[in-house]
């Protein structure tokens, strides 16, 4: 074992070895391995231990932990994408295997595309017979664990739930100071869950492992679902809008969705799996699923409470580390899109103050905005809205005196808009909520009024 070396192309199997949770310390251990190599141990730590669970909730927690173990394994599987998957211990059922195959195949879509890999037909989870899973009603308390990422979307959800009187705990995973500061500014109870990847993964990357994007929202969803059961709470709430279901259209390849695990397909599958396999009264849903990105931006713009605290810039989370005062890089697709989406709904001076500069009056940013518009380029591999939303926002700005002289807006009006159907550039239809969602009915009837155009 000690002389085992990582050889990506020689590895035959990825093993889900075991998982366990120590209720006295709040630490869950997820154990994996390649072939007969060393154990790869990931830990997830829930604050608030020790936990005391009755028999039914302890069993539900074991089920939730099992799916977390299986979903989180995607971080390690991708290092070698071997031909075999081995699930040790009690076999999983056919429904769980089918769910996991979708998560791995679609969640690794961008990873496969960028690395020139074809995973279709390759990902097969071994399983036992199909089972009629019937999860118990646990009597969970009416309380929402609400995921916060520090951006506008989760803050819209948090404030909507607050206004409707829904008890909530603002929850995030990892050590981001940006997210922690934003969570603290909500004034609500908070829960910071720890996650520590197996350290060998970084060694494997240096030794030639395949690398790239994983369905991180799927992993985070499984972590929060496990936490909800342990804490006895009945809702896990994310803030993924309907445009997350649409990917980038790649010529010769088809649709590749960077944010597949933020989309409706994942949400509906995972929510159904939790209710059939973990607890019948555990709800998993996205509060913003009925809304477009533009509708979310419009909602966020109604309050200035978070102007100096929010950030949707993923590049800052990656490169700035312990410097949470710098919240916008101004050059990444997320900065481009958030600026463009907010522009129709707030005064120009306010938006420029938030970002520190006017991104739409910088000719050097042409290529980035063209990608958002899907003009001579495809939608970026980022969590941004649909091309039609960006085109509608730009068209709205082209009609406004305070914006239409800015370099990129003027170029859109001059060169791009004449090639487009004017009816398809109207912003109003994009602000109407959809009916495809899993928000509890009574809550949605109240929210519908709040989110109405």
Image: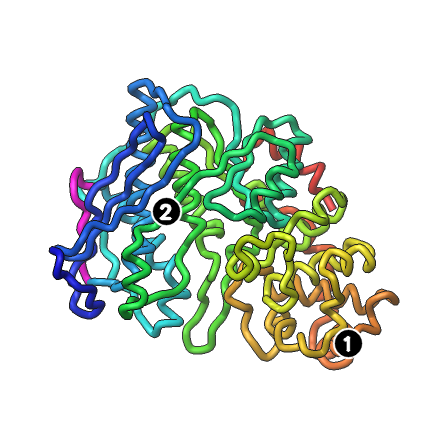
Q: Considering the numbered disc 1 on the image, is that residue within a helix, a strand or a loop?
A: helix
Which quarter shows the N terminus?
bottom left
Name the side, left or right, on which 390 lies relative to 18.
right
Which quadrant holds residue 380?
A: bottom right
- Which of the two discs, 2 and 1, labels the residue nearer the N terminus? 2
From the viewer's side, name the closer residue of 413 and 68.
68
Name the side, left or right, on which 138 lies relative to 396.
left
Q: Where does label 1 land, which residue?
A: 407
- What are the residue bounds of the magenta stretch? 83-91
From the viewer's side, name the closer residue of 211 and 407.
211
Q: Where does label 2 land, which residue?
A: 196
Residue most extreme to the front: 322
Q: Residue, x 32% and y 37% (percent of image)?
A: 28
Q: Residue, x 71% and y 64% (percent of image)?
A: 392
Q: Is residue 99 at least partly visible in the picture?
A: no
Mark 1 Cα-neighbour bin, 10 Å: few <14, some 14–19, many ≥20: some
**Rendered position, 451 above or below 399:** above
* Magenta stretch holds residue 98: no
From the viewer's side, name the closer residue of 40 and 85.
40
């Amino acid at each position: 074992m000690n002389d085992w070396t990582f050889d990506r192309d020689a590895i035959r199997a990825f093993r889900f070895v075991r998982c366990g949770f120590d209720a006295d310390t709040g630490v869950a251990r997820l154990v994996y391995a390649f072939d007969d190599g060393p154990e790869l141990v990931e830990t997830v730590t829930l604050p608030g231990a020790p936990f005391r669970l009755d028999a039914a909730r302890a069993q539900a927690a074991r089920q939730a932990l099992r799916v977390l173990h299986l979903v989180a394994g995607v971080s390690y599987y991708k290092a070698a994408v071997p031909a075999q998957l081995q699930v040790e211990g009690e076999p999983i059922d056919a429904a769980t295997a089918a769910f996991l195959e979708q998560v791995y195949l679609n969640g690794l879509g961008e990873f496969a595309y960028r690395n020139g890999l074809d995973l279709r037909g390759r990902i097969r989870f071994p399983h036992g017979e199909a089972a009629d899973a019937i999860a118990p009603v646990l009597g969970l308390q009416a309380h929402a664990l609400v995921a916060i990422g520090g951006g506008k979307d989760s803050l819209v959800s948090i404030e909507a739930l607050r206004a409707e009187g829904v008890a909530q705990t603002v929850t995030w995973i990892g050590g981001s100071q940006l997210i922690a500061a934003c969570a603290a500014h909500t004034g609500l109870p908070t829960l910071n869950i720890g996650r520590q990847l197996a350290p060998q993964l970084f060694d494997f990357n240096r030794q030639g492992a395949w690398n790239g994007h994983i369905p991180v929202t799927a992993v985070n969803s499984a972590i929060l679902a496990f936490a909800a059961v342990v804490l006895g709470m009945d809702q896990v709430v994310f803030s993924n809008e309907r445009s997350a279901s649409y990917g980038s259209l790649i010529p010769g390849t088809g649709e590749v969705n960077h944010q597949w695990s933020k989309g409706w397909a994942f949400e509906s599958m995972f929510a159904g799996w939790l209710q059939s396999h973990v607890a019948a009264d555990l709800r998993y849903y996205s509060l913003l699923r009925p809304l477009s990105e533009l509708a979310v931006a419009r909602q966020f713009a109604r309050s200035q409470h978070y102007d100096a605290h929010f950030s949707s810039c993923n590049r800052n989370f990656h490169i700035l580390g312990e410097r949470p005062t710098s919240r916008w890089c101004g050059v990444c697709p997320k900065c481009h899109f958030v600026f463009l989406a907010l522009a129709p709904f707030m005064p120009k001076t306010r938006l420029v103050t938030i970002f520190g500069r006017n991104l739409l009056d910088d000719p050097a940013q042409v290529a980035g905005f063209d990608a958002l518009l899907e003009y001579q380029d495809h939608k970026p591999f980022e969590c941004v809205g649909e091309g039609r939303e960006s085109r509608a926002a730009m068209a709205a700005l082209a009609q406004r005196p305070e914006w239409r002289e800015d370099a990129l807006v003027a170029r859109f009006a001059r060169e791009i808009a004449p090639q487009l159907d004017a009816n398809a550039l109207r912003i109003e239809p994009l602000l109407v909520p959809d009916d495809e969602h899993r928000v509890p009915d009574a809550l949605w009837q109240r929210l519908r009024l709040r989110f109405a155009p």
